[in-house]
């Protein structure tokens, strides 16, 4: 995979700022892209930090899928070749301003938040790229469709809570069961036997290797939260029903990194 640093142009930065300026607007007109289009625009050889469920099922044809996606973007006028002064052939491709802004913001956030919800029917993902007081959200379904929106970062915890608990069953806090790692591995299947969905949320910053996380198990009528603590190398797993307030507090701590 490519490890070459990206050299952002003035146009990239202006496009990114233009997308951020849409925060709070009801009609944002931001793109919906497929796995193939994401990879074609961002670079086929570049590592992706997001789920690519469609391409994961077609790993042997990623190059072809990316080329087909790029052809489609060119035909639709969403991407176009650029010829530098003095050259006779195009040397690179540009996308329209909203796509350029989104692709830039995905790579330049001060903090990245990832959330994965797993049910018996498949998986669903939310990604958040924090830019000061605005967040770019990337919503990915199990068909490999990526939808984007921007809004105040303070609203993101609520979006994550809706992902983890769409039926709003988180009611009140319960007494935690404190378990060692071995006890948790042995007892989790019984403690969380009625779980219908598991949502794992992690947060990391560009300038820190520390990763924050929160995990929620949605069952019938209740949501359990998992809190993992490290005390002198001894891991403790606390499992307890959580209220909406506790869920939001834990999610906010992951978003800010101040948990």
Image (tube, rainbow, N blue to C red):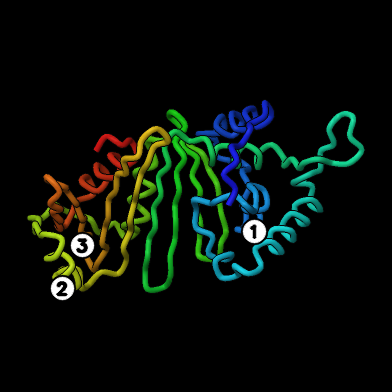
Residue mark closest to the camera, 1 vs 3: 1
- Tell me if I can see residue 9 in this picture: yes
Q: Is residue 177 left or right of residue 256?
A: left
Residue drawn where x is 54% and y is 39% of the image: 107
Q: Are discs 2 and 3 less than 8 Å apart at CB?
A: no
Instruction: Tell me which label, 1 or 2, sits earlier in the chain.
Output: 1
Q: Is residue 98 above or below residue 195?
A: above
Q: Is residue 139 above or below residue 62?
A: above
The percent coordinates of residue 16 (x first, y second) are 60, 32
Mark 2, Cα crowd under 10 Å, few <14 / some 14-19 / many 20+, is few
Quadrant of the snapshot with the C terminus: top left
Q: Secondary structure at mark 1?
A: helix
Residue drawn where x is 29% and y is 44% of the image: 212
- Residue 220 appears in which quarter of the rendering? bottom left
The percent coordinates of residue 52 (x first, y second) are 54, 60
**Label 2 to label 3: alpha-carbon separation:** 15 Å
Q: Is residue 28 left or right of residue 63?
A: left
Q: Nearer the viewer, residue 180 or 33?
A: 180
Instruction: Tell me which label, 2 or 3, sits earlier in the chain.
Output: 2
- Residue positioned most to the right: 88
Q: Which residue is mark 1?
A: 36
The percent coordinates of residue 39 (x first, y second) are 63, 53
Q: Is residue 69 left or right of residue 257?
A: right
Q: Is residue 72 above or below residue 107?
A: below
Q: Is residue 178 left or right of residue 84?
A: left
**Label 1 to label 2: alpha-carbon separation:** 41 Å
The percent coordinates of residue 132 (x first, y second) are 44, 28
Q: Which residue is mark 3?
A: 222
Instruction: Tell me which label, 1 or 3, sits earlier in the chain.
Output: 1
In the image, which disc is placed on residue 133? Answer: none
Q: Secondary structure at mark 3?
A: loop
Q: Which residue is mark 2?
A: 190
């Amino acid at each position: 995979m490519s490890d070459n640093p990206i050299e952002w142009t003035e146009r990239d930065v202006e496009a990114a700022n233009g997308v951020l300026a849409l925060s709070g607007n009801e009609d944002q007109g931001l793109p919906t892209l497929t796995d193939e289009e994401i990879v074609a625009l961002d670079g086929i050889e570049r590592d992706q930090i997001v789920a690519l469920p469609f391409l994961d099922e077609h790993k042997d044809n990623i190059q072809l899928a990316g080329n087909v996606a790029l052809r489609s973007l060119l035909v639709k006028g969403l991407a176009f070749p650029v010829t530098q002064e003095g050259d006779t052939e195009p040397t690179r491709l540009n996308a329209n301003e909203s796509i350029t802004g989104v692709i830039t913001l995905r790579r330049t956030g001060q903090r990245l938040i990832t959330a994965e919800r797993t049910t018996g029917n498949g998986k669903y993902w939310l990604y958040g790229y924090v830019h000061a007081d605005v967040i770019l959200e990337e919503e990915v379904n199990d068909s490999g469709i990526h939808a984007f929106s921007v809004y105040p970062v303070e609203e993101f915890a609520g979006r994550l809570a809706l992902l983890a608990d769409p039926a709003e069953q988180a009611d009140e806090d319960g007494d935690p069961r404190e378990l060692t790692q071995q006890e948790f591995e042995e007892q989790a299947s019984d403690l969380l036997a009625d779980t219908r969905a598991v949502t794992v949320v992690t947060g990391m910053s560009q300038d820190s290797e520390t990763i924050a996380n929160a995990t929620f198990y949605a069952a019938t009528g209740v949501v359990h939260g998992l809190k993992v603590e490290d005390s002198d190398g001894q891991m403790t797993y606390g499992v307890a029903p959580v209220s909406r307030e506790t869920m939001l507090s834990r999610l906010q701590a992951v978003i800010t990194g101040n948990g």
